[in-house]
Image (tube, rainbow, N blue to C red):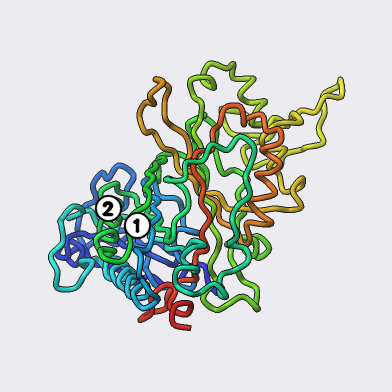
Amino acid sequence: MTDRPAVTPLRRRTLLGAGGLAALAAGGAVLTTAAPGESTRDTGGREPEARIPFHGPTQAGILTRRQPHAHLAALDLLPGVDRPLAAGLLRAWSGAADRMSRGETPVEGEADTGVALGAGPAALTVTFGFGPEFFERLGLTAARPEALGPLPAFPDDRLDPARSGGDLFVQVAADDPLVAVHALRALQRLTRGTALTRWVMSGFTRPPGAGAPDGTHRNLMGQLDGTANPTPAGDPAHRARILVTAPDAPGWLRGGSYVVLRRIRMLLDHWEGLPEAHREQAVGRRVSDGAPLTGGTEHTPVDLDAARPDGVPVIATNAHIRLAAPRGNAGATMLRRGWSYHDGMRADRTVDAGMLFVAWQTDPRTGFVPVQHRLARGDALSRYLVHEASALFVVPAGAAPGEYVGQALLEG
C-alpha cells in the first residue's frame, strides 16, 4: 500500500472550462500545475490547481495535510432505504467525487451551480464513513465491526443528541472556502430521496504557507495543536495504529480507519483571563513556540520525569500533555486533524467557539477511549472545556478506478 499514488496533471483550460470545480479526493499526493507562460498571482496561500485524485487505497482526508476550510456532516438514511438504494447513493457520491477531482461537473450532462467557478480543485478532499446504525438499517449487522460499538459516557459530557451520531459521515476540506461548501452542497443534492442531513459543523485553520509549523496549527486557546501527532508515512508502527492493516480485516475496511468526532466548546471568556504561566502549566507547553516546559523546541520529546530542585514535576501531574501521552495510556495513539470553529455568541452572552476534534485510529477501544477516560479524570484543561457533540464512524478503504467507496461491503 502506498501513501502517495500517482497524480495526473490538470491543465488550467480544463479546470476553467469545467467550472473550476472542487476535487473530491481519496489518496495522498497534491500536485500544482500551471499553463506554460502563465504568470503567477497572489492566491492568499492557496494553490487553486492543487489536486488530490479520488481513487486510491486509502481515502484522502486522513493522511493528507490539513486544509484550512472544513465541513463535517452526518446524514441519516430515510425509512425504507435498502441496500441497493444505499449502494446507489455511494455510487453517485463516488462518481461525483471522481469527476470533480478531474475538474468536471459533479454529474455528467447536468449544469452546475457555478459557486466554485474558477476556483480550481484547491486540494479538496472528501471522506466517507458509516455509523453503527448504517449496518443495522441495511441488514448488515453481522458485518458491523466490533470496534464500532457505542462510545462510553464520560464525566462532564453535555452531548446534544441532535448534533451527535448519524448513519453516514462526510468530511469535506479544501484550501478555498467556496470550493468546500460547493462540494458539500453537491453531495447533499445527490441524497434526495435517500438520506437527510442530520448535522453540519464547519471549521477553519490557517492557510497553507501562512507560517504555521508543518502538521500543527494554533487552536483558539492560543496553543499549537497536533505537535505530538504520529508520522504514519515514515513509521509503519504508527501507520498500523491509524489505518486498519491487519490481514484478517475485511477487504472493504483494509486501508480504512475509525474516526471519532467531538465538538468541544472552549470557555474562552475564562481561559483568556488567566496568566500565561497558568495556561502553559495546564497544557505543559510554552505558548510562544509550543516547546515542552522541560525545554527544547516544539518537537523536542517531553521529559515527563524532569523535576525542579524541590522535587515538583516540571510537567504538572494534571497537565494535558502528561495525561494524553501514550506512555500513560498503554501506547494509545491517534492522528488528530481538528479544526477551530466560531459560531458567534450564546444566549448567556458567552462566546460559542472551540474545536472540532477529529481523531483517526485503527481501533477506538485502544485509541480514543482510554485517553479520554484518563483526561476526564483530572486534565487541567477540562475545567475550560465542554464536550457538546460526539460521533464514531468506520471509514472504508478508498475506491479503485471504476468502483465506489464501500462497494465490497454493500455488494459482498
Q: Nearer the viewer, residue 87 or 368?
A: 87
Residue 231, picture quadrant: bottom right
Q: Residues within 10 Å of mark 1 (few under 14, many from 20)?
A: many
The residue located at (14%, 73%) in the rendering is 109
Residue 202, picture quadrant: top left
Residue 86, picture quadrant: bottom left
**Are dots 2 and 1 in contact, CB under 8 Å?**
yes
The type of residue carrying mark 2 is Val
Q: Earlier in the sequence, mark 2 or mark 1?
A: 1
Q: Position of residue 333 (x, y in %)?
A: 66, 53
Q: Position of residue 7 (x, y in %)?
A: 38, 70
Q: Position of residue 175 (x, y in %)?
A: 34, 49
Q: Which mark is residue 152?
A: none
Give the residue pinned by disc 2.
179
Please determine whether, in this image, residue 297 is positioned above or below residue 384.
below
Give the residue pinned by disc 1.
124
**Horizontal arrangement in the rendering, residue 179 relative to residue 7 (left or right):** left
Please determine whether, in this image, residue 122 is positioned above or below residue 177.
below
Q: Nearer the viewer, residue 275 or 171?
A: 171
